[in-house]
Amino acid sequence: MTLTSPSLAVLGLAVRAGLGVTVRTPLWLRRGVRLLSGRRLPALPWTNLWLMTQTAPRPAPAEWMAALLHEALAGNRARPAAT
């Protein structure tokens, strides 16, 4: 059984109700949710992350988000997309 939703709130409610697990960054951890580190879970596939904004001038929130993502992902080397 799977649950898909565009709403992080819905996914969070399902996880907190004990109905399953989800893959999120540590920034998403909330009360009532625990990290399953060290468990024998399947490896996650690599994925590309794209942040798309208007060309110029970019709004301050877009600049802040780009800086936040860059900092959070620093040190993680992206694999090239499969062709």
Image (tube, grey):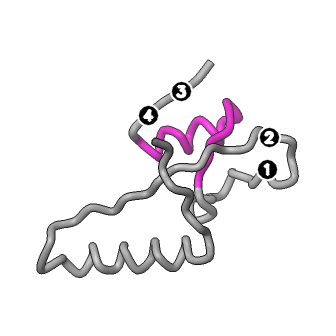
Per the image, label 2 sits on a secondary structure element best described as loop
Please name the amino acid that badge 1 sits on: Leu
| Numbered tag placed on residue 21 in the rendering | none
26 or 58, which is in the foreground?
58
At horizontal 56% and vertical 40% (from top left) the residue drawn is 13
- Sequence-first disc among 1 and 2: 1
Magenta region: 7-24
| 4 or 1: tag closer to the N-terminus | 4
Q: Which mark is residue 41?
A: 2
**Kind of residue at badge 3:** Leu
Q: Amino acid at mark 4?
A: Ser
Where in the figure is residue 77, as x and y percent of width and height?
59, 67
* Quadrant placement of the N terminus: top right
Q: Spatial distance from mark 1 to mark 2, Cα to Cα?
A: 9 Å
For residue 55, which quarter of the picture? bottom left
**Image location of residue 70, percent across then percent down:** 47, 76
Residue highlighted by disc 4 = 5
Secondary structure under the numbered disc 1 in the rendered image: loop
Label 2 CA crowd tier, 10 Å (few <14, some 14–19, many 20+): few
Please say if the residues under marks 3 and 2 sit with CB atoms less than 8 Å apart. no
Residue 73 at x, y percent in the picture: 55, 71
Cβ–Cβ under 8 Å for marks 1 and 2:
yes
Up-down relation of residue 29 to residue 81 (above or below): below
Say the numbered circle drawn on residue 36.
1
Res 61 → quadrant: bottom left
Number of numbered discs present?
A: 4
| Residue at figure coordinates x 63%, y 63% from the top left | 26
